[in-house]
Each structure stands twice: as C-alpha cells, then as structure tokens.
C-alpha cells in the first residue's frame, strides 16, 4: 500500500509539473508574440521558438540532464521577467481616433468640469465624424446611475459601462476601454501581455450607445441602478479620481484584471456599498445577473423579465433624434 501511495504521489507531482511547464511556456510564448518589440512578421516565429525551448527545458527536468534543464528554464524565466518589467505604459502614442482623448473629470466643491467628452457622429462601425467638448455639471444635481451591457458575440461576453444622470443635463457615460493605436486590432489574448493601455472614455449616449445599437447592431441592455443619489455621487467621485490617476500615471489594460467590468466593480466597491466578489465579475456577459442577485438592480420582477425589458436596441434604432435619444431609450427600459 505505501508503494502504491508513493507511486500515486509521484505521478501527481509529475502531472502538475508538466501542466506548470506547459502554462509557463504558453505565457512566455504569448509575451514574446504580443508584447516583445519585434517586427510583426518575426513575432510568431520567435514565440514558437521560445515556447518550444521552454517545453524542452521542462522535459529535461525528468531526465538525466535535469541540471541543464533547470538552468535553461531558470534563464528563460528570468529573461522573460526582466523584459516584462521593462515594458511601461504610455500616454503618448498614435492613438485611434475614438480613444485619442481620455476623459478627465475635475471637481471643485459642487462644480464638475469634464474635459474631452466624446460626441462622435458615427458613419460606420469604425468611422466617425469626430467632435469633443467640455461639459459642466452640478454635483448636487446627480440623480442616479444606469448600467449598460452591450453584447456583440456570445452571451458570456459584453462591454459594460455606467452612465450618470444629472437633473437638467444630458447623461454622462463613462466607459473603461482599451486604448488602441492607429490600425491596431483588439485581441483578448494580447490583452494579457501589456499590449494595450487602458483609457477612461467620457461620452454622450448618442455616441457611445448609438454606435452599438444603430451602427454595429449589438444587443444593448440598459438597467437603472437601484441606488441612492448619494451612492451615485460617491461612485462618480471615484470615477473622477480614477480619471485623474490615469492622467498622471498611465496603466495597462488586462483582459482578466483591468477591464470594462473589473475596474467599475472595484470603483463601486470603494463606495462602501458592499459588492462581494463573484465569478460573474470576470465573465462580463453575466454582470447584470450578478448586480440583480446582489440587489443593485430592481428585484420586483424575475430576472429574465427584467432583462427582457432592459433590451433597448430596437427602440434606439427608432429614436427620432440625437437630442431625444437618452429619454427615448429610457422609455423603452422602464417597466
């Protein structure tokens, strides 16, 4: 019996070691492919080379050449770690037009100034007539916040952003996004490897919502957050602080930890309202179900009915004008 146990333990450790080496090789290869400063044509070959080298070094650990394998593996890990540490985020690149300017929110007393509010008129999924403006709000007039979820592929994937309502003013949408450079395409895999900076976009709903409903034909849902105006104010203040923090210290987007859902989640937690972690924070398409279960959305109806009533894409396409757009889509979302 002890021999059987020893054999099982040895097999388990070997299997765990093999999985660990495979994951390590995948991470190093991904880093080289997506983040290393290499010509685009060379990156896949270099990634394949270091990936195979890492696997070979790991395999050597189980052979008579384990010392050489351990040294090679240590050298690869150290080289990757040092290279990773040298890659710093920047606020000065040739940005794509829609993320060329970051929203910047300044608060002095009750006076709010929002610089770089995006009010684009979209002519295609990736083309628009650009317009940026500065807006002023009275913080005492904040009424609440709404949560938007926009699905473009599977039900598990969505882009989430928050829009704040002020009495007597147009709502202000705040969206955490990747900051693509000119001609750059988004890749969820690349988002793990310091490929993109993160940006806070401040936008008019006639831009950030309408491009998704009317131009890109995404399935968009609008939920009114069931929170007090005081809570909405605290959340807005945290967004304002985040905008200024990014202005002074750029940061990288990360597909898992720093994205359109996890960042708002952390900002909302900072309000003190109590938002325990849940797997749906990471799987953004189910963020609405998470908020419903935690009591941050109206629970007077079952969630499937709440979600059905929150769908606004069809109504948004019928909005009579940009001026009427915010009120029009909220009429569709109301019970």
Image: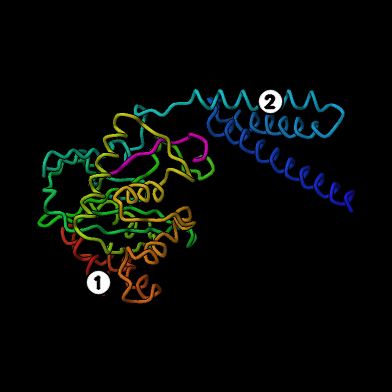
Residue found 23% across the figure and 66% down from its top: 330
- Counting from the top left corner in percent of width and height, residue 103 is at 26, 40
Is 305 magenta? The answer is no
Give the residue drawn at x 28%, y 38%: 243
Task: Determine which of the numbered discs, if any, sits on residue 93 in the image.
Answer: none
Residue at the extreme front: 2
Query: Residue 89, how many percent across, how many down?
Result: 41, 29
Q: Identify the image quadrant of the C terminus.
A: bottom left
Quadrant of res 22: top right
The vertical placement of 306 against 127, above or below, is: below
Asked if residue 184 is positioned above or below residue 205 in the image, the reply reads: above
Which element is circle 1 on?
Answer: loop
Residue 157 can be seen, yes or no: no
The residue under label 2 is 74
**Which quadrant would the N terminus be assigned to in this image?**
bottom right
Give coordinates of residue 39: x percent, y percent.
55, 26
Q: Is residue 13 visible?
A: yes
Residue numbers of the magenta segment: 191-201
At a point 30% along the width and 64% down the height, the residue shown is 223
Q: Nearer the viewer, residue 140 or 331?
A: 140
Residue hosting label 1: 334
The residues tagged by marks 2 and 1 sit, at their Cα atoms, a distance apart of: 59 Å
Q: Residues within 10 Å of mark 1 (few under 14, many from 20)?
A: few
Q: Quadrant of residue 321?
A: bottom left
Q: Nearer the viewer, residue 7 or 220?
A: 7
In the picture, measured across the screen, residue 52 lies left or right of residue 237, that is right
x, y (%) of residue 166?
Answer: 15, 55
Look at the image and say whether residue 192 sits in the magenta stretch: yes
């Amino acid at each position: 019996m002890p021999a059987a146990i020893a054999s099982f333990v040895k097999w388990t450790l070997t299997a765990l070691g093999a999985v660990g080496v495979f994951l390590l090789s995948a991470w190093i290869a991904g880093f080289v492919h997506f983040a290393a400063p290499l010509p685009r044509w060379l990156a896949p070959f270099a990634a394949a080379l270091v990936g195979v080298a890492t696997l070979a070094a790991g395999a050597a650990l189980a052979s008579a050449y384990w010392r050489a394998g351990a040294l090679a593996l240590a050298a690869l890990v150290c080289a990757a770690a040092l290279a990773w540490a040298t890659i710093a985020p920047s606020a000065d690149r040739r940005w794509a037009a829609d993320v060329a300017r970051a929203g910047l929110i300044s608060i002095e007393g009750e006076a709010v100034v929002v610089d770089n509010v995006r009010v684009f008129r979209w002519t295609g999924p990736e083309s628009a007539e650009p317009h940026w403006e500065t807006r002023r709000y009275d913080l005492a007039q904040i009424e609440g916040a709404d949560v938007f979820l926009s699905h473009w592929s599977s039900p598990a994937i969505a882009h989430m952003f928050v829009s704040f309502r002020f009495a007597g003013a147009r709502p202000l949408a705040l969206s955490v996004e990747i900051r693509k450079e000119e001609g750059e395409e988004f890749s969820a895999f690349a988002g793990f490897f310091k490929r993109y900076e993160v940006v806070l976009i401040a936008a008019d709903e006639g831009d950030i919502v309408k491009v998704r409903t009317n131009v890109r034909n995404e399935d968009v849902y609008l939920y009114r957050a069931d929170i007090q105006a005081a809570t909405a104010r605290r959340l807005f203040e945290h967004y304002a602080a985040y905008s200024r923090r990014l202005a002074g210290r750029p940061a990288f987007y990360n597909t898992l930890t720093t994205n359109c859902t996890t960042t708002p989640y952390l900002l909302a937690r900072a309000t003190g309202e109590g938002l325990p972690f849940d797997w749906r924070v990471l799987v953004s398409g189910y963020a609405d179900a998470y908020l419903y279960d935690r009591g941050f959305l109206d629970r007077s109806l079952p969630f499937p009915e709440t979600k059905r009533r929150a769908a606004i894409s069809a109504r948004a396409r019928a909005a009579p004008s940009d001026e009427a757009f915010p009120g029009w889509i909220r009429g569709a979302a109301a019970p």
